Amino acid sequence: MSKHEDSIREGAQDLVEPGEEIVAALVVSPRGSGTAMAGGVAAGEIGARWSGKNVGKAEDVGLAVKRNSGLTLTNRRLLTLELAISLTGGIKEVKGLLSDLPLESVDAMKSKWNVLTVSAGGGEFKLECKPPAAKAMVKAFEARKATA
């Protein structure tokens, strides 16, 4: 378990319902956010467009995502969380719930390097994250869907 996952688990306990447990958690940003922040006019514009498209696709399925938000899988729901991130990249605080989606509404998750693709409600969106955390999220999701 990563430091980020531990911090999200600890900070999100008040946001889960009775009997609900956090299965996996990680810090994500809409795909393209890193490119938008990389510098340079062209890269910034391309990244901003890319990021905006993935924010819109996430909203289409009922989830709000933004740069450095938390994505948390419970035994019942997929949650997005507003996080306070320190200058060194650590999680200072889980500020609150941005959105949630019943687990049965999520069709699939897959990871490829630092991109986590979430399919739900007939659409899909991409998130940037750390590769080991993405793989752990997909593994936990697949295990949860197999038992559902």
Image: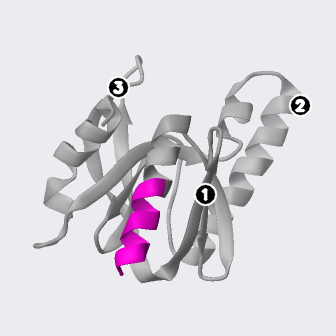
Q: Which of the two labelled residues, at mark 3 and mark 2, occupies the earlier sequence position?
A: 2
Residue occupying the point 50% across, 56% down:
138
**Pointer 2 local density, CA inside 10 Å: few below 14, some 14–19, many at least 20:** few
Asked whether the viewer can see residue 59, the reply is yes
User: Image height check: is 51 above or below 4?
Assistant: below
Give the mark toward the camera: 3 or 2. 3
Q: Name the residue tied to disc 3.
A: 90
Which residues, given as a range, are shown in magenta?
139-148
Q: How many marks?
A: 3
Q: Nearer the viewer, residue 58 or 72?
A: 72
Q: Residues within 10 Å of mark 3 (few under 14, many from 20)?
A: some
Classify residue 143 as left or right of residue 95. Answer: right
Residue marked by disc 2:
42
Q: Is 130 left or right of 95, judged from the image as shown?
A: right
Q: Residues within 10 Å of mark 1 (few under 14, many from 20)?
A: some
Secondary element at tag 3: loop
Q: Nearer the viewer, residue 142 or 99?
A: 142
Image quadrant in which you'd find residue 94 = top left
Query: Label 3 vs label 1: CA separation?
Result: 25 Å
The alpha-carbon separation of the residues under discs 2 and 1 comes to 29 Å
**For discs 2 and 1, the disc positioned in front in the rendered view:** 1
